[in-house]
Amino acid sequence: MNQKHTGSCLCGTAKFELLGEFKKFFLCHCSRCRKSSGSAHCSNLFAPGAQLTWLSGEEMLSFYKHEDTNFARTFCSVCGSNVPTDAKARGLVVVPAGCLDTNVDISPQAHIFTSSKGNWDDGFENVPAFEEMPS
């Protein structure tokens, strides 16, 4: 069943539509994902055979592929936000979950590359949570 999703970068320059179905949802802790996100992990959705259409801003996108690996990122050259990468050679679209403007009906299925986790990436269930920036 093909689902339609839309998304955008932080500044709104790059907007896209994806027609397809998310089959996998992984939280990746590899060092490359940590460095590219500046966070504990990347939250990536995988949509094999999906059709990605750029509605605006395609000319402002930059692409980076790490030499000799499958690691690749597409990002807005204005705000730096990660946006979908159409991995045509692998037959799938990889979508950073945070760039979606629509809800998804799949939950993360696994933490992957946990052997690469930062030494500070543990015990988050014990860290206080706030609805907004604490004073």
Image: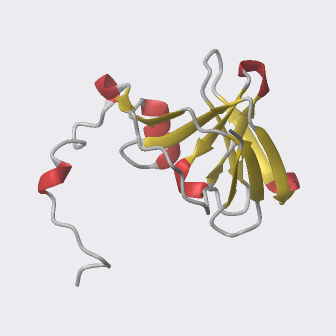
Q: Identify the residue shown where x is 19% and y is 51%.
A: 124
Occupied quadrant, residue 122:
top left
- Left of 9 or right of it: where is 19? right
Decide which of 14, 24 is in the foreground and name it.
24
Q: Residue at x 15, y 46 (%)?
A: 123
Which part of the image, by quadrant, shows the C terminus? Answer: bottom left
Percent from the top left, x then y, of residue 78?
A: 72, 62
Residue extending farthest to the front is: 1
Q: Does residue 31 appear left or right of residue 49 in this picture? A: left
Please tell me which residue lies in front, 92 or 10: 92
Report the residue at 36% width, 44% height from top: 40
Residue 75 in percent (x, y) is at 68, 49
Percent coordinates x, y for residue 67 in the rendering: 65, 20
Residue drawn at x 77%, y 20% is: 89
Q: Quadrant of residue 102?
A: bottom right
Q: As drawn, which residue projects farthest toward the left?
A: 126
The N terminus: image quadrant: top right
Determine the image quadrant of residue 21.
top right
Q: Is residue 102 left or right of residue 114?
A: right
**Number of on-image labels:** 0
Residue 79 position within the rendered picture, expressed as x and y whole percent measured from the top left: 66, 63
Tell me: residue 49, above or below residue 135: above
On screen, residue 58 above or below 70: below
